[in-house]
Image (tube, grey):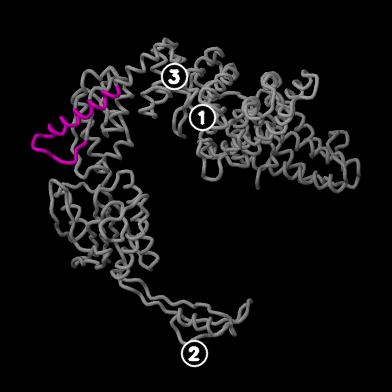
Amino acid sequence: MPDLLLELFSEEIPARMQARASADVKRLVTDGLVEAGLTYASAGSFVTPRRLVLTVEGLTDNSPTTTEDRRGPKVGAPDKALEGFLRGAGVAREDLEEREDKKGTFYYAKVTSEGRATSDIIADLIPQIVRNFPWPKSMRWGTGSLRWVRPLQSILCLLTREDGSDVVNFDVDGIASGNTTEGHRFMAPGRFSVSSFDDYSAKLRAAKVVLSPQDRSDAIWHDATNMAFAAGLEVVEDAGLLTEVAGLVEWPVVLMGEIAEGFLGLPAEVLQTSMREHQKFFSVRNPATGRIERFITVANRETADEGATILAGNSKVLSARLADGKFFWDNDLRIARDGMGAWRKALENVTFERRLGSQAERVERIATLALEIAPMVGADPTAAETAARIAKADLSSEMVYEFPELQGTMGKYYALEAGLDPAIAAVAEDHYAPLGPTDNVPTAPLSIAVALADKLDLLTGFWAIDEKPTGSKDPFALRRAALGVIRIVLDGGLRVRLDRLFDMQLVVHKGAIIDPIDRDEVAELVREIANHGVFGAAWKAVKESRGGLPSSGFIEMKEQVPDKSDDLLAFFHDRLKVHLKAENIRHDVIDAALSMPSNDDLSLVVARARALQAFLDTPDGENLIQGYKRSANILAQAEAKDGVEYRYGADVKYAETDEERALFTALDVARTAIAPALAEERFEEAMTEMAKLRAPIDAFFEAVQVNADNDIVRRNRLNLLNDIAQTCGAVADLTRIEG
């Protein structure tokens, strides 16, 4: 069984495209081989800056001969249709059979496809893949028509067997396949032939090329950490940079250089970002002081002077870059120490979104909302308002203009330089978090208040202007913002009523958009929502206080805000389901919890859902749900048939059996225990008490006929079923549970 070795050798492939290209070449080739009828034992792909490599082991020698019955046109179809079918199937008219099925009588042909040699299949497949390779960006060069990420220089394609290897011959835009490749561009120039994958990888290493990206990454990290450790330092971990640098070199040579003394006073994040973004250097930190003192660079070649010339050049370029950073830092410090007023003023000229105003207006909205949220999360309202007003001031700084990824981080440094309390300064950095599903959430009360205000203002603003995420499109990262709110609330165990906050901020946004509207009405409505917690009651209170017909814009507010608030809450509920998927909480369980009152209190919803899921995972829980559903179904059928509701409470004096009386007693005991447990939100305890109903409910249904002949007994038993449904449904809406 032959093995395939394929190498596509080109000019340097951008590091960011390498991993995907390696996966694509493996997928496209193996899928094509399987589609052609071949099988294989294993496949592996590799990539370096100058080559895409694929090895496929244990290929079959040829594809099998296959025979199929191919259906043609109906008997009696036009001659042209029949002739086309005969040509496509490669058979004569007399070879056709007529077969009848439920749709009529059709012609059938027995079509035999002869097997093909593996080399012939590969010779047809690879040129198609090369010509249609899915590079994110590609180019043409010379006079050819082939497009590749960078000029393609050669193609190596071998089929290797125990008795030797053969070139799979084909041509792509004038580039003929062969059995030769090249090693390192500088240290081992010139071509050489190979006979198998083992021979290929061994000769490449001898020619100063490490084929595996993982091997290059491991070598870089091993040498870098050892070099830093020997100097009493440590390398700052950066997995993304490590992957990128491993994609820039074929023969990694790790070198460590020093940072000039004049730049060591810069914040560590400035040094790290500048070196990472501009030079692709790793930062080396002094663990005793936390300062970045040296850098690690990775060269692509060994030199006679052991990298001294390379380090000298890198240090010179780095000093020029860091000089810019120091200039920005020094200029920014003067403004920061003056209270950052100039930066906050500058935000008035920065548009956040055309319909949502400037960044300065957004900051004011966040500060006002943070003032409202602060007491809910245990933060000082005045401090929260102050923190919100300075949290985005650094967006106007020169350093953040140069390095946008440092927003917040620089804000913290500048706030400290301005003499603000460290807890307030920390908000500038923390309020952006979490930026991703694995990012830490803020834990300090002040940071939580401003982070929630920031994200809720973003969401309500775009809901107010009908710019919601659609499908896979989410240009304003609203899904991320909602997930951030969910994680902050749940991780902090916070009890925040989102509906009230949605209403308040939607009123603020709509008040700025709707014209005409009385601004005093808007401010009063926001205050009344804060007092009442419900938009409808607040709107009515403002209308009454005005003593007349409000403005048309105020009436429009009533028509729009409640619907948008409900829609935004539904959006949060969808995000919550996605978030809880990792906990294996079923969607129907979450729906059962969401159907209960106060479903804008996410901590309460999740507590219900977790308790219900744990309950359903037990035999008692599963069986009790069946008893509940049986009760609810019988009750619903009886009410539909009789046209009345059986919801008025059953009386034990009409019970005729011991099982009935036992169920009455069990329900009384359960209600007595469940009510205080629910009042104190001890849902697990409430579920435990519910589980005790399983046996009496099972016994009731086994021994008692609900639809008795006696009307009084029947009504009493139907009312008893309602008692079961009400008692069991006190924790969650069990009608939502599937199955």
Of the pair 617 and 288, the residue shown nearer to us: 288
Under circle 3, the secondary element is helix
> In this view, which residue lies farthest toward the bottom?
94
**Residue 504 x, y percent position in the rendering:** 64, 24
Residue for point 55% across, 80% down: 73
Q: Residues within 10 Å of mark 2 (few under 14, many from 20)?
A: few
**Residue 327 x, y percent position in the rendering:** 30, 20
Instruction: Look at label 1 and name its amino acid.
Output: Phe
Inspect this view and state whether residue 651 appears.
Answer: yes
Q: Is residue 63 left or right of residue 652?
A: left
Q: Residues within 10 Å of mark 3 (few under 14, many from 20)?
A: many
Instruction: Look at label 2 and name its amino acid.
Output: Glu
**Residue 79 x, y percent position in the rendering:** 54, 85
Residue 94 shows which numbered tag? 2
Give me the C-alpha separation between circle 2 and circle 3. Answer: 88 Å
Under circle 2, the secondary element is helix
Of the pair 731 and 555, the residue shown nearer to us: 555
What span is colored magenta in the figure? 298-325
Eye-nearest disc, 2 or 1: 1
Residue 343 shows which numbered tag? 3
Tag 3 or tag 2, which sits nearer the N-term? Answer: 2
Of the pair 57 and 513, the residue shown nearer to us: 513
Kindly identify which residue carries mark 1: 352
